[in-house]
Amino acid sequence: MAKVSAVNKNNKRIKLSDRLFKKRQALKKIVMDKKISLEERFKAQQKLSNLPRNSAKNRVMNRCQITGRPHGVYRKLKISRIALRDLGLHGLIPGMTKSSW
């Protein structure tokens, strides 16, 4: 199991990034638009830098939904490789069997 504080911190980042996603996208659009004056783009850049760092989507860590493990997580399943193996061994995933050779 991962530390509860690390999982909670990641959940906080997810909520914050979801809440400020539209605002961040609008500011980025202004900053990247070359037709807008330099002063307005600079003001938008300042507002963007004043937003919390944790509101950026790339600060969110993909964690296992079962164990909270940060590495070795399958994106589609949102489960770590170890948890997936355990579920497969217990027969909880249809069609998945333990390999033997």
Image (spheres, rainbow, N blue to C red):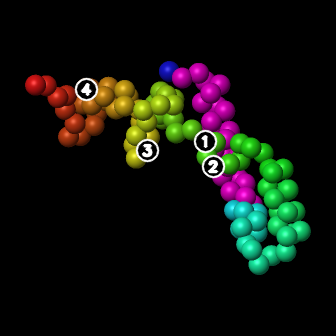
Mark 3 vs 4: CB contact within 8 A: no
Q: CA distance from mark 4 to mark 1?
A: 30 Å
> What residue is shown with label 1?
60
At x 40% / y 47%, what residue is drawn?
Answer: 76
Residue under numbered circle 3? 75
Residue 7: x %, y % from top left: 60, 30
Look at discs 3 and 4 and give the one toward the viewer.
3
Q: Secondary structure at mark 3?
A: loop
Asked whether the beta carbons under mark 2 and mark 1 sit within 8 Å of each other, the answer is yes
Rendered residue at 32%/25% (across/down): 86
Left or right of 89, for residue 34: right
In the image, 3 versus 60, the foreground residue is: 60
User: Closer to the N terminus: mark 4 or mark 1?
Assistant: 1
| Magenta region | 2-24
Specify whether 35 is left or right of 61. right
- Image vertical order of residue 99 relative to residue 45, above or below: above
Instruction: Of the two numbered discs 4 and 2 on the same chain, state the one appearing first in sequence.
Output: 2
Q: Which residue appears at 72% of the width and 67% of the height?
A: 32
Q: Identify the residue position indicated by label 2 in the image.
A: 57
- Callout 4 amino acid: Leu
Kindly state the secondary structure of the residue where label 2 is placed: helix
What's under tag 2, amino acid-wise?
Lys
